[in-house]
Amino acid sequence: MAVERTLAILKPDCVRKNLIGEVIAHIQKAGFKIIAMKKTRLTNETAGGFYAVHKGRPFYDSLVEFMSSGACVPLALEKENAVADFRTLIGATDPKEAAPGTIRALYADNKGENIVHGSDSYENGKIEINFFFSSQELIQNE
Ligand code: IDP
Ligand code: MG
């Protein structure tokens, strides 16, 4: 399997609940290398741009409002099969449907406030990493 990259975002609920360290521990124990990481706050406009694919969906406005409601922590991650493996690690969008032991099952309150984002394809992973990080900020571990 090829080494690939994916984008994670620790969402504002994760930051508010002081779960940054705990969630990153899950990510590292699962074998993901952190290539880049920062704490930032999205505006309505940048959150809307990031989730533009969902524009028109009934949850779009509340999603944009939530994602700009506080700080978040984007991370660029690297691992073999990173995109699919990270989706497995976080679990289904709705924590009620997420497999036991997944990050969303453990920590998320509901389908909207679900602790963490993960890219859904290799191509989107690249696009989403470039949305948050410049090439100089992507630093492969020794
Ligand atoms: P994903 O994050 O598991 O890939 P998507 O379908 O891409 O899920 O939706 C993006 C985000 O939009 C979700 O993580 C969640 O925060 C929010 N969302 C998706 N569907 C719903 C819904 O039915 N109600 C409320 N929020 C939703
Ligand atoms: Mg998605």
Image (cartoon, rainbow, N blue to C red):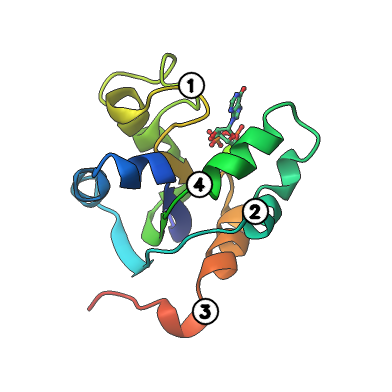
Q: Tag 4: residue type?
A: Ser
Reading the chain from its start, which is encountered first: label 3 or label 1?
1
- Estimate the spatial distance between the alpha carbons at disc 3 and disc 1, rounded to whole Å: 31 Å
What residue sits right under mark 3 in the picture?
134
Quick check: 60 above or below 118? above
Snapshot quadrant of residue 62: top right
Q: Amino acid at mark 3?
A: Ser
State the image coordinates of residue 7 (x, y, percent, origin top left).
47, 56
What residue is shown at x 45% (from left), y 85% (from top)?
136
Q: Earlier in the sequence, mark 2 or mark 4?
A: 2
Q: CA distance from mark 4 to mark 1?
A: 20 Å
* Mark closest to the chain's N terminus, 4 or 3: 4
| Residue at image coords 69%, 51% | 48
* Mark number, residue 69: 4
Which residue in the protein does label 1 denote?
A: 94
- Identified by mark 1, the residue type is Asp
